[in-house]
Image (cartoon, rainbow, N blue to C red):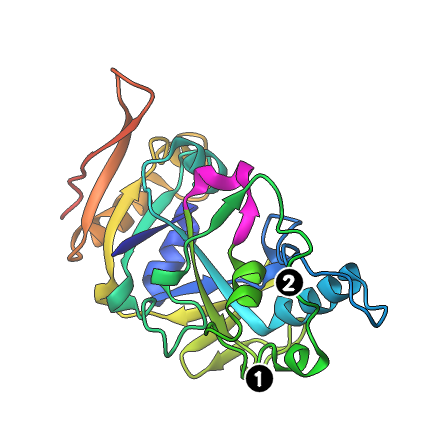
């Protein structure tokens, strides 16, 4: 299965050059309702659903890294929102070769990471989590039959308004990476922690052959013509270097007969 990541051109350069891709903490994603869909019942011992939700959200937020991918590389809204207004790039990864489908190395692997979009939140149908289970978040708690509902509701529920994204998530445990959320950067095994716009990004090494497709935005060259971050020669050199890779490289264009984007083979080999 190939899944896709929308990003700016400069971000794509870093991802391709470093052979890595970034995982974010839940609290740094762009939906303020992340990790609030537990639907706890109010407890008999005065533990409110809100208290239980806040406690779980605090534990989940920095113990796990989330990679958000999508099934569709030609979604015009996704290009506008995440592809730098069609000036960016979409990268397509083979989930098996990237290790995203491995249930042993992922808390939630790609085949189980499809988002659930709903018009209403789950409501008062999940028992309040106990202290022992709460403390296991980030440790032994995994996406198995015992923790299925808790993990699913922490990571895989979003409001129906987000359904256009067709999101699939890969979730990894980052608790043992020896760099705090606000402190430290550097490499640890297959991870490289960096800071982007004041927020940590946990970059995971991926095999070079796992990158299978590159889609170029309709307005990619606008960066050059508007005096953007790259020169015309630099852009051509980068595209030629990508064209020499064993990947399918496509140029996106609006279809003249519909409201859809179409992709045509891009010739950028030297």
| Residue located beneath label 2 in the image | 126
- The stretch of residues the image draws in magenta is 157-166
* Left or right: 151, with 253 as reference point: right
Could you tell which of marks 1 and 2 lies nearer the N-terminus? 2
Q: Main secondary structure of the magenta part?
A: helix
Measure how far apart labels 1 and 2 are at the Cα level: 33 Å
Q: Residue furthest right?
A: 46
In the image, residue 255 sits, relative to residue 195, either above or below, namely above
Q: Is residue 237 magenta?
A: no
Q: Nearer the viewer, residue 177 or 16?
A: 177
Q: Picture quarter containing residue 154?
A: bottom right
Q: Residues within 10 Å of mark 2 (few under 14, many from 20)?
A: some
Q: Is residue 158 magenta?
A: yes
Q: Measuring 62% from the left and 77% from the top, which residue is drawn there?
A: 184
Name the spot of residue 5 as percent of width and height, x first: 38, 51
In the image, residue 194 sits, relative to residue 141, either above or below, namely above
Q: Measuring 52% from the left and 61% from the top, which residue is drawn there?
A: 152
Q: Residue furthest top?
A: 257
Disc 1 is placed on an element classified as loop
Q: Nearer the viewer, residue 91 or 187?
A: 91
In the image, residue 143 sits, relative to residue 246, either above or below, namely below
* Left or right: 97, with 19 as reference point: left
Q: Nearer the viewer, residue 30 or 236?
A: 30
Name the spot of residue 226 as percent of width and height, x first: 45, 30
| Residue located beneath label 1 in the image | 178
């Amino acid at each position: 299965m190939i899944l896709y990541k929308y990003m700016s051109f400069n971000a794509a350069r870093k991802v391709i050059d470093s052979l890595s891709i970034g995982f974010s903490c839940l609290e740094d994603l762009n939906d303020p309702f992340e990790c609030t869909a537990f639907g706890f019942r109010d407890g008999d011992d005065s533990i409110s659903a809100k208290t239980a939700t806040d406690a779980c959200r605090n534990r989940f937020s920095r113990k796990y890294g989330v990679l958000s991918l999508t099934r569709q590389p030609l979604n015009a809204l996704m290009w506008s929102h995440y592809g730098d207004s069609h000036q960016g790039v979409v990268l397509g990864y083979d989930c098996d070769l990237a290790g995203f489908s491995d249930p042993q190395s992922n808390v939630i692997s790609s085949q189980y990471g499809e988002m659930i979009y709903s018009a209403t939140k789950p409501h008062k149908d999940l028992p309040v989590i106990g202290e022992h289970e709460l403390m296991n978040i980030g440790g032994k708690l995994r996406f198995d039959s015992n923790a299925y509902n808790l993990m699913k509701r922490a990571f895989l529920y979003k409001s129906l308004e987000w359904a256009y994204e067709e999101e699939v998530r890969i979730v990894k445990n980052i608790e043992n990476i020896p760099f705090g959320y606000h402190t430290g950067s550097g490499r640890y095994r297959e991870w490289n922690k960096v800071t982007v716009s004041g927020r940590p990004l946990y970059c995971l090494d991926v095999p070079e052959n796992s990158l299978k497709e590159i889609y170029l935005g309709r307005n990619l060259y606008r960066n050059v013509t508007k005096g953007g971050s790259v020169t015309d020669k630099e852009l051509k050199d980068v595209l030629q270097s990508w064209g020499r890779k064993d990947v399918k490289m496509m140029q996106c264009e609006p279809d003249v007969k519909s409201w859809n984007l179409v992709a045509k083979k891009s010739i950028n080999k030297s």
